[in-house]
Image (spheres, rainbow, N blue to C red):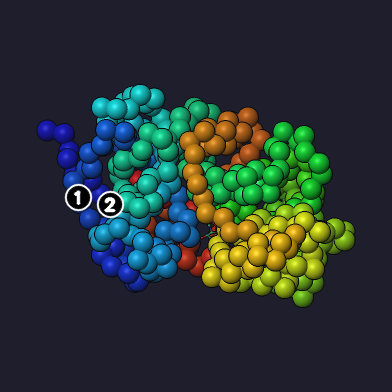
Amino acid sequence: MAKNVMHAVQYDGYGGGPSGLKHVEIPIPNPNKDEVLLKLEAASLNPFDWKVQKGMLWPLLPRRFPHIPGTDVAGEVVQVGPGVKKFKAGDKVVAMVNPLNGGGLAELAVTKESLTATRPPEVSAATAVGLPVAGLTAHQALIQSAGIKLDGSGEEANILITAASGGVGLYAVQLAKLGNTHVTATCGARNLEFVKSLGADEVIDYKTPEGATLKSPSGRKYDAVIHCATGIPWSTFEPNLSANGKVIDITPGLSAVANFALGKLTFSKKQLVPLLLSPKAQNLDYLLKLVGEGKLKTIIDSKYPLTKAEDAWAKSIDGHATGKIIVEP
Ligand SMILES: NC(=O)c1ccc[n+]([C@@H]2O[C@H](COP(=O)([O-])OP(=O)(O)OC[C@H]3O[C@@H](n4cnc5c(N)ncnc54)[C@H](OP(=O)(O)O)[C@@H]3O)[C@@H](O)[C@H]2O)c1
């Protein structure tokens, strides 16, 4: 008889960090009409995952307890809902699980057809699975918020990318360099050479007094900042921006939202723009194509088996990963 239960990692309430995670055997989920069921080959963690556990998105998320965290998954389709057109059993895919439901830290997971993309054979599951949240956020910030054209056809733009050694930052640096840009990036001392190797034109150590000012070593003013770090006030960005410079804040707090509103009210040309990911499979297809062509790479910080998911969780909470943290069933 086919196995109808699976190993999953879940938590029963807010808080608890890594020790709040429990390993359980639960029934394999059934795909709804527009969903596919995947046997997972890899999942990747994002700070979003532990922020939900911490209650930072209360009362919106999670929808209910127990909750299986994890949004980014890669695997093989084992079953499709009756309305699914693009996929069939046996297809290798990468997907973003509906963040309202979660489900990525498990042996199998259901994903919406509309947030699932075919994984080209030349792109490994561990490489592809870094892309959904981090890659799509970097892409959206550059294309939609900063207006960069990745075919290089736009006017030259000076871009600052903060936390360039992190999941979003590493994709942002590489994608920005496909456009007509000069990229300044921030990271810690141990990652200066690494971030240069991603294509950044100049790199500053965020822990030095000069680095903390975010000043471009070559004296440039930034047309856009892809702000992937946290805790930097507007007063630090403002003197470094060009006349119409924008700070695209991917971790906007209340002050960022207030700043955005104030900027609109006062018709200020320099603006702080909050970003919330709006994931699209066509953009995931595009990123997978770039990876397949060797124009974009995923840097893997570390890999953990699902049985050690709490170690991966602790590593993500620690906030010092260089690249993506991967969990493999
Ligand atoms: N709005 C959205 O939809 C959205 C989507 C994705 C992510 N996010 C948010 O974006 C943030 C970044 O996500 P991520 O996945 O890139 O995180 P991550 O991979 O955990 O980032 C870790 C990296 O950030 C570096 N870092 C931390 N503080 C820094 C600073 N002040 N200056 C320079 N580098 C710094 C660390 O370097 P060291 O080890 O040297 O300190 C480390 O390499 C998170 O807050 C996440 O929740 C939001």
Q: In which quadrant of the rendered view does residue 253 lie?
A: bottom right
Q: Nearer the viewer, residue 149 or 42?
A: 149
State whether residue 105 appears in this view: no
Q: Which amino acid, by three-letter code, is at mark 2? A: Ala
- 67 relative to 213 in the view: left or right: left
Q: How far apart are marks 1 and 2 (CA)?
A: 7 Å
Q: Residue furthest right?
A: 219
At a point 63% along the width and 54% down the height, the residue shown is 169
Q: Does the residue labelled 1 lie within 8 Å of ligand 1?
A: no
Determine whether, in the image, residue 172 is placed left or right of residue 245: left
Instruction: Report the disc number at residue 26.
Output: 1
Q: Examine the rendering and report whether any part of residue 183 can be seen.
A: yes
Q: In this view, does 98 lie above or below 75?
A: below
Q: In which quarter of the image is residue 288?
A: top right
Q: Pointer 2: what residue?
A: 8
* Position in image of residue 315 (x %, y %): 47, 63
Q: Is residue 215 left or right of residue 233?
A: right
**Residue at left offset 47%, top offset 66%:** 317
Callouts 1 and 2 close, C-beta under 8 Å? yes
- The quarter of the image holding the N terminus is top left
Q: How crowded is mark 1: few (under 14 residues within 10 Å), some or many (20 or more)?
A: few
Q: What residue type is labelled 1?
A: Ile
